[in-house]
Amino acid sequence: QVQLVESGGGLVQAGDSLRLSCVASGRTFRNYSMGWFRQAPGKEREFVARIGWSASTYYGDSVKGRFTISRDNAKATMYLQMNSLKPEDTAVYYCAADLRPFYSGNKVSSQDYAYWGQGTQVTVSS
């Protein structure tokens, strides 16, 4: 059974940084592409970033240049380094994982991901 557990959220001020983590279990982590999404109150879930099984990366326009996605296969953990945070980054952040291994394409729809974590709240005050 695949499990994803996020951590690292919190309350910060505009301009600060945070690093989110997503620990995966239940299968061979290094073989699967993964992503980060976020959802603010009253809004749809939004694509943030994706990292391929081969470590290729892809970002949503709203975070490009400020956020960095990475993975540590030895620790079965994916990260999201968030710099220069803005109040509009306030949301619950979710990690998600592909159903099948070795897929390298970019997926920006939440419907294309099979597994989800429980989310971690990020609040950025102005």
Image (cartoon, grey):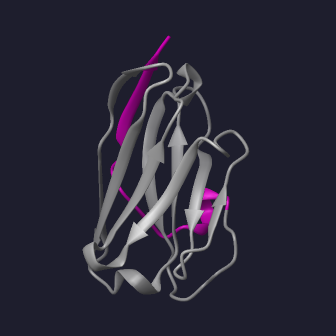
Q: Residue 25 placed where, x, y %?
A: 26, 74
- Relative to residue 108, is residue 98 drawn left or right? left
- x, y (%) of residue 76? 30, 73
Looking at the picture, tell me which residue is in the foreground, 91 or 110: 91
Q: Is residue 5 left or right of residue 80?
A: left
Q: Which residues are magenta?
A: 108-126
At x 34%, y 58%, the residue is 22
Quadrant location of the N terminus in the rendered image: bottom left
Whether 10 is drawn above or below 101: the answer is above
Of the pair 64 and 34, the residue shown nearer to us? 64
In magenta segment, residue 78:
no
Q: What residue sits 51% from the left and 26% below the top? A: 41
- Report how many numbered discs are placed on residues in the image: 0
Q: Position of residue 78 (x, y in %)?
A: 39, 63
Residue 53: x and y, percent?
A: 52, 80
Find residue 49 and report its image quarter.
Answer: bottom right
